[in-house]
C-alpha cells in the first residue's frame, strides 16, 4: 500500500473519533491515582552479645596476698557470701582488740547506769513519805532496845539464876564421872560383851571358811557377816579398855574447864549488868529513837540536795562513759571496714563467671578478681550502634535476634534501655543498647555468645 494513502486513512480515522467524542457530550473525569503512603520501619542491624541481667567485676579494695578462694567458676553464690580473702591477720587482731575494748567500756557503762539507777531510787525514796513497813521496822528496833535496857536494870530473874546453877551442877557431875574409877558391874557387863562378840567372830569366820571356795553370792554374804562381827568385837574391846584405863589427862582437863565456865556464867548472872553495859543499852535506845524520829519527820532540804547531787554526779559519769562507748564502737567499725577491704563479697545472688586470681598470688587493689553475673535471666547487649543508627532507636522497639551458636532458632526481644553516653571505638562514636528477650528458648544460651540483632528504628521520616 502507498505510504501516503496509509497516512490519509489514519488521519480520517482520528477525525472521526474526535467527532464522535464531541457529539457524545462532556468529557469523562479520569479516576485519581492513590499513592501508597504506608511507611515501612527502618531496621538497624548490629552485632551483639548474650549478657546476664546483672553483672559485676569484683575486686579487693586493697592489695595483698590471696589466702583463700571459696568458689569455683560456674558456681552459684548468694548475696553476702565471702568469695575470696587476702591475708588479714593484722586486721583481725586489730578488730579483736577493738571488740575487747568495746566490751570493757560497755561493762563500765552498765556499772555507771546501775549507779545512776541507784541514785535515782535513793532520791525518790528521800522525797517520798516513809512507808508503814519502814515505820514498823524502826519501832520494832526501838522496842527491842528498850526491852534489853529494862532487863539489864531489873537484874537477873530467879529462872535465869536457876538455869546457870543447873549448868554448873551438870558440868561438875560430868567431871566426877570422868574422874571416878570403873565400877565392877560395868567392867563385868562390858567384859561379857567382849566375850560374846569374840564368839560371834569365830562363828562368822567358820561360816566364811565353809563357803569361801563355793558360790560367789554365798561368799559375799558370809564375808559381810564376818566384817560386822569383827567391828562389833573391836568396839566392845575399846569400851572395855576405856573402863580399865580410866579417863585421860586431857579429858579431865576439858571437863574441869567446862565446870569453870559454868561457874563464871553463874557469877555473871547473879551480879547483873555492869554500869558500862547499861550505858551501852541506853545508847542503843537513843539511836533507835533518833532513827524513828528522823523517819517520821521526813527528809530535810539538805538531804534532798545531797541526793540530787548524787544523781547529777552519776548522770555525768554515764554520759562520759557513753561517749567512750561511741568511740569504741567507731573503732570496731573502722576495724571491720579494714577486714572487709581484704575480702571479695558477693553483692547479689549470681553465678561466678571467671576467677582471675590464685591462692598465694599477690594482687593489687582495684584489679578485677572475680566476675559475677545473675544468669537467672539473659539479655542481649550491643555497643555497635553509631550515632546515625541510634538516634531513632527507642525503648520498647521490637528486635529480631539470631544466635551464631544456635542456627535456625529464632528469638525476639524489645529494647529496654539506650545508654545516654557514647563511647569511641576505633575512631567511631557508638552507643550501647540493652535488649530483653521476649520469646525463644533461652536455656542453651551462654554468657558472651555472639548474636546479631535487627532493631526497628522508626524515625517518622522516609528513607
Image (spheres, rainbow, N blue to C red):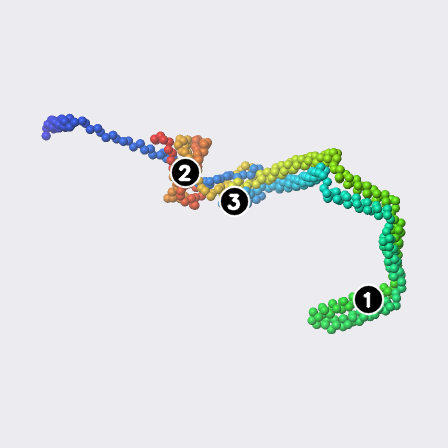
Cα distance in 3D space between marks 3 and 1: 86 Å
Query: In this rendering, would 81 be left or right of 129?
Result: left
User: Where, by quadrant of the figure, is residue 363 drawn?
Assistant: top right
Left or right: 415, with 244 as reference point: left
Q: Looking at the image, which is closer to me, 332 or 109?
A: 109
CA–CA distance between discs 2 and 1?
A: 113 Å
Crowdedness of circle 2 by 10 Å Cα count: few (<14), some, many (20+)? many
Q: Circle 3 — which element?
A: strand
* Mark 2 or mark 1: whose residue is earlier in sequence: 1
Of the pair 219 and 6, the residue shown nearer to us: 219
Name the image quarter holding residue 119. top right
The numbered disc on residue 236 is 1
In terms of sequence position, does the residue under pointer 3 or pointer 1 come before the other? 3
Q: Position of residue 415 (x, y in %)?
A: 42, 37
How far apart in space, not on screen, are marks 3 and 2 (Cα)?
29 Å
User: Where residue 77 is drawn, which disc sits there?
Assistant: 3
Q: Residue at x 86, y 69 (%)?
A: 188
The percent coordinates of residue 399 (x first, y second) are 39, 38
The answer to whether residue 273 is visible is yes
Q: Is residue 11 left or right of residue 70?
A: left
Q: Which residue is mark 2?
A: 414
Q: Is residue 105 above or below residue 249?
A: above
- Which one is in front in this view, the residue at disc 3 or the one at disc 1? 1
Q: Are marks 3 and 1 in contact (CB under 8 Å)?
A: no
At label 3, counting other C-alpha atoms closer than 10 Å, the crowd grade (few under 14, some 14-19, many 20 or more) is many
Q: Position of residue 50 (x, y in %)?
A: 44, 40
Amino acid at each position: 500500500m502507498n505510504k501516503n494513502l496509509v497516512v490519509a486513512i489514519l488521519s480520517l480515522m482520528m477525525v472521526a473519533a474526535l467527532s464522535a467524542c464531541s457529539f457524545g457530550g462532556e468529557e469523562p473525569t479520569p479516576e485519581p491515582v492513590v499513592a501508597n503512603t504506608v511507611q515501612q520501619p527502618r531496621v538497624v542491624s548490629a552485632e551483639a552479645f548474650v549478657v546476664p541481667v546483672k553483672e559485676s567485676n569484683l575486686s579487693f579494695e586493697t592489695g595483698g596476698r590471696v589466702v583463700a578462694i571459696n568458689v569455683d567458676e560456674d558456681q552459684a553464690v548468694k548475696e553476702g557470701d565471702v568469695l575470696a580473702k587476702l591475708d588479714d591477720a593484722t586486721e583481725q587482731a586489730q578488730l579483736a582488740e577493738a571488740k575487747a575494748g568495746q566490751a570493757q567500756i560497755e561493762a563500765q557503762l552498765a556499772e555507771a547506769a546501775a549507779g545512776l539507777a541507784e541514785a535515782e531510787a535513793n532520791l525518790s525514796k528521800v522525797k517520798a513519805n516513809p512507808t508503814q513497813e519502814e515505820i514498823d521496822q524502826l519501832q520494832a528496833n526501838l522496842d527491842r532496845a528498850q526491852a534489853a535496857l529494862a532487863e539489864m536494870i531489873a537484874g537477873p530473874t530467879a529462872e535465869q539464876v536457876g538455869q546457870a546453877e543447873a549448868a554448873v551442877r551438870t558440868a561438875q557431875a560430868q567431871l566426877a564421872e570422868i574422874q571416878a574409877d570403873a565400877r565392877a558391874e560395868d567392867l563385868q557387863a562390858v567384859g561379857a560383851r567382849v566375850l560374846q562378840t569374840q564368839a560371834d567372830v569365830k562363828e562368822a569366820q567358820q561360816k566364811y571358811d565353809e563357803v569361801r571356795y563355793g558360790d560367789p553370792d554365798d561368799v559375799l554374804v558370809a564375808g559381810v557377816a564376818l566384817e560386822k562381827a569383827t567391828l562389833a568385837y573391836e568396839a566392845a574391846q575399846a569400851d572395855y579398855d576405856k573402863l580399865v584405863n580410866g579417863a585421860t589427862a586431857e579429858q579431865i582437863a576439858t571437863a574441869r574447864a567446862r565446870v569453870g565456865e559454868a561457874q563464871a556464867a553463874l557469877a555473871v548472872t547473879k551480879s547483873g549488868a555492869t554500869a558500862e553495859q547499861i550505858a551501852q543499852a541506853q545508847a542503843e535506845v537513843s539511836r533507835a529513837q533518833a532513827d524513828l524520829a528522823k523517819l517520821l519527820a521526813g527528809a530535810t532540804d539538805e538531804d534532798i540536795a545531797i541526793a540530787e547531787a548524787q544523781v547529777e554526779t552519776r548522770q555525768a559519769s554515764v554520759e562520759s562513759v557513753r561517749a567512750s562507748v561511741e568511740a569504741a564502737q567507731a573503732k570496731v567499725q573502722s576495724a571491720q571496714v579494714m577486714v572487709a577491704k581484704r575480702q571479695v563479697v558477693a553483692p547479689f545472688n549470681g553465678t561466678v563467671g571467671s576467677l582471675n586470681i590464685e591462692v598465694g598470688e599477690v594482687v593489687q587493689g582495684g584489679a578485677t578478681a572475680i566476675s559475677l553475673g545473675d544468669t537467672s535471666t539473659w539479655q542481649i547487649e550491643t555497643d555497635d550502634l553509631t550515632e546515625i543508627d541510634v538516634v531513632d532507636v527507642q525503648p520498647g522497639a521490637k528486635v529480631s535476634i539470631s544466635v551464631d551458636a544456635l542456627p535456625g532458632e529464632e528469638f525476639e526481644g524489645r529494647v529496654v534501655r539506650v545508654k545516654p553516653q557514647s563511647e569511641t571505638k576505633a575512631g567511631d562514636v557508638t552507643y550501647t543498647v540493652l535488649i530483653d528477650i521476649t520469646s525463644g528458648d533461652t536455656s542453651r544460651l551462654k554468657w558472651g555468645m555472639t548474636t546479631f540483632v535487627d532493631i526497628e528504628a522508626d524515625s517518622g521520616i522516609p528513607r
